Amino acid sequence: MKVPYKLIFAVLLALFLCTSLLVYKRYLDDYTSDFIDHNIYSSVLGEHRKVFIRLPENYDKRKAYPLIVKSDGNFNLSRWDESVAELSRQNKVEDSIIVAIPNLFWVDARNRDLVPPYARKDVKIEARLASDNDPSIFGQANLFLAFIETEVLPFIETTYAINDNRVLSGFSAGGSFVLYAIVTKPKLFTGYFAFSPAAWYDESVVVREFKNSLSSTTGDPLFLYLSLGGAENNIITASFKGLLSAIQSNAPDNFYSAFSFSEDAEHIENPYVSVPKALEAYYEFRAENSH
């Protein structure tokens, strides 16, 4: 029995429409925000990039606000919004401008942007296709950091009023980016938050480089917050403990840190638990070092 061409066409059309709707929904979820979206052309990266801008409640253009830059786009952005707003109402933190940089939508550039240059090989525990392990797509965090320093921050400074209270935050690969940034550009931000940092790449090369570079962070008081989920795997947990050991043995006197373990939390759950804890710990640090 022959299947009518019209039926085949209708089925294919339905599949196409369903796929298109799913892709469009994912685009809206990942590459648009509930706040203010800006497009920036990056000469450093050679591409257009989006940034999501969350302004404080009752934003006043005449007032300069603290700044939080997060490398994970929409991931937990609502949690940041709620936490900063609630804690500021409690006078525990200052309401802040949050700048979230999403990953590219059509291109898988997260590892390229966030993995440090010395960690270019095994970026996932699971087996990957050989083409996905091409070193050329990994290890360009130096360019992404330059993008933030020379293009994102100047754009924010000329568009909104911000002060010198500035935080950089990242999760997983974004956490390894934060660890790279704090020892590479320690004066760019005053606080650095690394949630479940992927420091285990290439037999914990991120841990070793972090430890060996901590001496470069001397100068003004600097704060790092680290957190890990209690249910994360042994590889991530071991590298996390390596980071704590590195701080204990090699951090200069001006380097302040705090850490937490989120009981029973998996890798993806830990940042949600950690956001308010990190903010409160950071403002305690600021209160103790305000003189």
Image (spheres, rainbow, N blue to C red):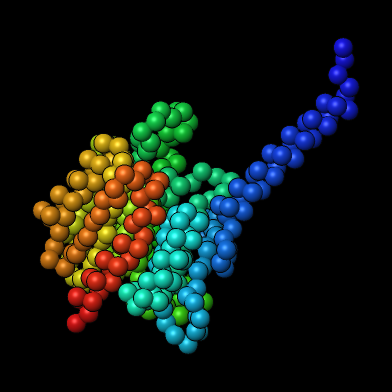
Answer left or right for 289 relative to 48. left
Answer left or right for 282 relative to 125. left
- Work out whether 238 lies above or below 164: above
Quadrant in the rendering for residue 2 = top right
Outermost residue, bottom side:
62
Residue 41 visible in image: no
Q: Residue at x 43, y 57 (%)?
A: 71
| Residue 57 vs residue 19, the one in the foreground | 57
Q: Position of residue 254 (x, y in %)?
A: 16, 68
- Work out whether 56 lies above or below 62: above
Name the image quarter holding the C terminus: bottom left
Residue 247 visible in image: yes
Quadrant in the rendering for residue 63 = bottom left
| Residue 49 vs residue 44, the one in the foreground | 49
Q: Position of residue 247 (x, y in %)?
A: 16, 55
Name the image quarter holding the N terminus: top right
| Residue 100 vs residue 136, the one in the foreground | 100
Outermost residue, top side:
1
Give the mark count: 0
Q: Position of residue 139 (x, y in %)?
A: 38, 45
Q: Residue at x 39, y 54 (%)?
A: 272
Q: Position of residue 166 (x, y in %)?
A: 35, 71
Outermost residue, left side:
249
- Work out whether 186 lies above or below 175: below
| Residue 56 vs residue 87, the one in the foreground | 87
Q: Residue at x 23, y 70 (%)?
A: 285
Q: Residue at x 26, y 50 (%)?
A: 261
